Image (cartoon, rainbow, N blue to C red):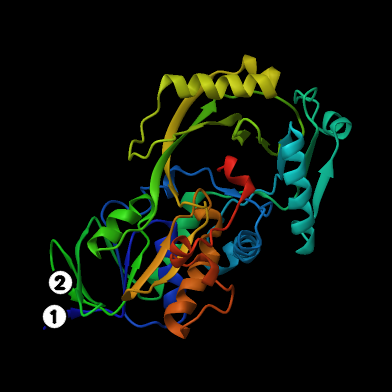
């Protein structure tokens, strides 16, 4: 007899495991998850864990607010401390155009009762005296924002999914998606063929390759982002918010006793995850420009991860019209970790109930690219 499953998830990162956990919560039947390598070894283990409500589109704000509820009560639900630190996000503006974007963002965010502040140059100087501020026109700050531990959150979803019966196949790659008459029929790994009516593409930066197995073009490209961490360095006795120089596309935050500095985001797609000297120099120059005291810091280590970038920097969620049973959870463009709890909820609702009641995800359908209904996001210059 052939093995059967109700849902098969391809991808064992934070998105795939959140979907698996939430499907199990909704008693969606036999759920199998396949990860070709180690769980979380792709983008999840290499992200910096940023969590923010300061987005400039309603759909992303909704995903943040729903996910925030999970992060706040994560230990109660999963028994693991996610190490959620609310240090705040501080966005810095140096041009009138950026100020215009920030003003519109604040208007939108306050509609959702997000306690975001609009701050002038003198106040910036007073509150964060270590910043170079002579070229700043203003900033926005929200105390709700911060970061959590990607590995801790991933472990919570893994343990939660396993407790509820999800079968997780680590180190086993899906080699083929079998389709008959426009419907998902089965998947094939190196070991076996498994019948299923539903396959979820949670392939992260490899989403387009998963799509190719179903003869579909998923418009997601992998872009490398490098980050670096200094050796222990004392800057101030106060809490340092995650600070973003919006114009330069650079950010920094405390990392244990040192500081994490963002490096450049590649412009050309690749699956490379090595770091290079030029990126370290750029990260250092940006750091010294905005925080002059960091000239005395030494970079101790670094790493690189892959973003899964969609054409409009918004997620691609939901069904594919031409293939029944194929569900997309792709293209998070740097926001997958922080939105993973909400993504798990909406995709599980779509599969079990036929529609998402938590958030209307229809604007995130893959059909929007053909129809020209792209979602404009002025904050695309910044990626956690």
Q: Quadrant of residue 16?
A: bottom left
Residue visible at 68% across and 36% down in the picture: 243
Residue 302 percent location from the top left of the image: 46, 29
Q: Can residue 239 be seen in the rendering of this structure?
A: no
Residue under numbered circle 1 = 2
Q: Within the image, what quadrant is residue 33 found in? A: bottom left
Res. 121 mark: none
Residue 48, horizontal then vertical, whole percent: 53, 43
Q: Nearer the viewer, residue 299 or 77?
A: 299
Q: Which SS class for mark 2?
A: strand
Q: Residue at x 40, y 70 (%)?
A: 20
Q: Position of residue 271 (x, y in %)?
A: 33, 40
Q: Is residue 195 toward the left or the right of residue 71 in the image?
A: left
Position of residue 133 in the picture relative to residue 73 (left or right) = right
Which labelled disc corresponds to residue 193? 2
Q: Earlier in the sequence, mark 1 or mark 2?
A: 1
Q: Residue at x 64, y 65 (%)?
A: 62
Q: Residue at x 75, y 49 (%)?
A: 143
Q: Residues within 10 Å of mark 1 (few under 14, many from 20)?
A: few
Secondary structure beneath dot 1 equals: loop
**Residue 93: horizontal and vertical position, in percent?**
74, 35
């Amino acid at each position: 007899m052939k093995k059967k499953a109700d849902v098969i998830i391809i991808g064992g990162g934070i998105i795939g495991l959140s979907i698996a956990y939430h499907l199990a919560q909704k008693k969606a039947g036999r759920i199998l998850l396949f990860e070709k390598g180690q769980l979380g070894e792709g983008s999840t283990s290499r992200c910096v864990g940023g969590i923010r409500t300061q987005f400039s589109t309603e759909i992303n704000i909704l995903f943040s607010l729903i996910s925030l509820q999970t992060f706040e009560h994560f230990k109660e639900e999963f028994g693991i401390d996610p190490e959620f630190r609310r240090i705040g996000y501080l966005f810095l503006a140096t041009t009138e155009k950026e100020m215009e974007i920030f003003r519109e963002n604040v208007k939108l965010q306050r509609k959702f009762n997000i306690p975001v502040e609009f701050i002038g140059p003198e106040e910036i100087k007073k509150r964060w005296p270590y910043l170079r501020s002579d070229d700043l026109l203003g900033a926005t700050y929200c105390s709700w924002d911060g970061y959590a531990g990607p590995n801790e959150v991933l472990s919570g979803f893994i343990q939660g999914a396993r407790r509820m019966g999800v079968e997780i196949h680590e180190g086993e790659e899906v080699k083929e998606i079998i389709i008959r008459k426009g419907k998902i029929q089965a998947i094939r790994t190196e070991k076996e063929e498994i019948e299923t009516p539903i396959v979820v593409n949670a392939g992260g930066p490899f989403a387009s390759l998963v799509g190719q197995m179903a003869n579909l073009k998923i418009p997601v490209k992998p872009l490398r982002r490098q980050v670096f961490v200094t050796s222990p360095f004392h800057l101030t006795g106060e809490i340092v918010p995650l600070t973003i120089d919006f114009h330069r596309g650079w950010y920094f935050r405390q990392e244990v006793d040192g500081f994490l500095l963002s490096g450049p985001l590649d412009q050309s797609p690749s699956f490379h995850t090595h770091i290079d000297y030029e990126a370290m120099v750029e990260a250092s120059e940006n750091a010294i420009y905005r925080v002059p005291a960091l000239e005395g810091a030494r970079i101790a280590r670094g790493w690189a991860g892959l973003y899964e970038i969609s054409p409009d920097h918004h997620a691609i969620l939901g069904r594919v019209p031409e293939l029944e049973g194929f569900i997309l959870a792709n293209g998070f463009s740097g926001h997958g970790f922080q939105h993973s709890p909400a993504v798990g909820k909406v995709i599980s609702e779509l599969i079990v109930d036929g529609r998402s009641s938590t958030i209307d995800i229809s604007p995130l359908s893959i059909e929007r690219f053909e129809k020209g209904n792209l979602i404009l996001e002025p904050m695309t210059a910044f990626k956690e």
